[in-house]
Amino acid sequence: MKDRAYRFPTGFLWGTATSAHQVEGNNTQNNWWAWEQEPGRILQGHRSGRACDWWAGRWREDFDRAAEAGQNAHRLSVEWSRIQPAPDRWDEGALEVYREMLQGLRARHMVPMVTLHHFTDPLWFAERGGWEREDAPQRFAAFVEKVVEGLGDLVSLWCTINEPNVLAYMAYLEGTFPPGEHSLRKALRVMVHLLRAHAAAYRVLHRRQPHARVGMAIHYRGFVPARPHSRWDRWVARMLSRLFNDFFPYAAQTGVLLFPWGRRREPELQGTQDFVGVNYYTQDRVQFDVRAVDAFFARRFYPPDADLSDHGFIANEPEGMYRALHWAYAFGVPVFVTENGVEDADDDLRPRYLAQHVHQVWRAVQEGLPVQGYFHWTLVDNFEWDRGWTQRFGLWALDVDTQERRKRPSADFYAAICRSNALRYEDVARYCPEVLHRVFPQASTVG
């Protein structure tokens, strides 16, 4: 039957995503390392430590695993504090290590996407006020200039800032990321500075590399009205999506900042994204609650019958991926799925989560949406920020003490997708038969 495989366009990028602090180990000069040393900051007192030991060279074996599994791309980040350990000092040796990593990807016929900022800041930058300072965008632009000077011949696909919306929310509203603030005023200031930093980086990259493709990775959170007939639920869902999802890509497209109280133009932001990176994991039901003042009058929850991850952190909501891609398409540029995955130590949920979400990506591509790649989070279990080692997102399991890797079944499933450039009936039947009728409804009824 024709519908026994959902095939993707030739040249589609299949990879995994990682970030420097989460995999390298011993990033001792950034604000997250310092944060980990403070009691109560990380679940169960965990610390990143050696992480996945990439800085000591174990990236080589992990890249081998990715390449052998048919992946033709990888998204990784560079650590600002390694490259610029002091405001007046650059570490050429650190740049050389990143050159080796990028050369390693190219030698394995994998396209690199490089993220320039993935949550961590140099200690010297954080201690001077970090992203609250007016000169933060200029500081970041100088770092980007150094990176593209040292690595630009090896990469042309750049992500300036990973999840700036999450950074602002977690660090300046919820307070679970450093510096642990609880201030809407500071959060909004930081959001503006992050946007200016992105725009400055965009111009640096395009001045150095006119052919570069530059964008941000935005954490898209679906906000679905709990009661579709309720105008208050619809209003609060729209308001949350506008502030959390839309703020950054809308400003990069139009030069307009969407504040809760109105709009403000900053023309220098306009036209500074060549693609939208979508980090999608799940979506919430949202109900208006006048008592939830600190939560923007929104009560967020998962349905009672939700297909939940290990700690109830993620609900398997594949339709949200489809909506996320249509949301990104509205900004008029190509789209990459820059992150998508689920915490699942036993690998019970991940296979069906992967099948259902890749199916929704294919569905969007079939409708003509310019989705050009999919990066699964993540290659090997890594240090998950304030949740430490309690969440396991890897296709490969990691023993933190021995650094032993163990392949999960979903690694073979993803390899089958990557190698065939398709989601095939026989692979879904093998790895997650419980959702075969949902992913291949016509073929599964015929047999």
Image: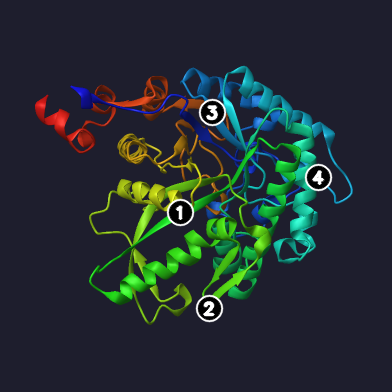
Considering the image in quadrants, where does the N terminus appear?
Answer: top left
Amino acid marked by disc 3:
Ala
- Using the image, tell me which numbered label, if any, was put on residue 261: 2
Tell me residue 237's x, y (percent): 37, 67
Query: Is mark 3 in CB contact (under 8 Å) with mark 1?
Result: no
Q: Nearer the viewer, residue 346 or 275?
A: 275
* SS at circle 2: loop
Q: Is residue 214 left or right of residue 414?
A: right
Ranked by sequence position, the earlier of labels 4 and 3 is 3
Q: Which residue is mark 1?
A: 220
Q: Amino acid at mark 2?
A: Trp
Residue 177 as seen in the image, left or right of residue 436: right
In this rendering, which labeled residue sits more in front, label 4 or label 2? 2
Q: Considering only vertical position in the picture, is 284 above or below 85?
A: below
Q: Earlier in the sequence, mark 2 or mark 3?
A: 3
Please, which residue is most extreme toward the bottom here?
290
Query: Looking at the image, is 342 positioned above or below residue 5?
Result: below
The x and y percentages for residue 241 are 43, 63
Which residue position holds label 4?
84
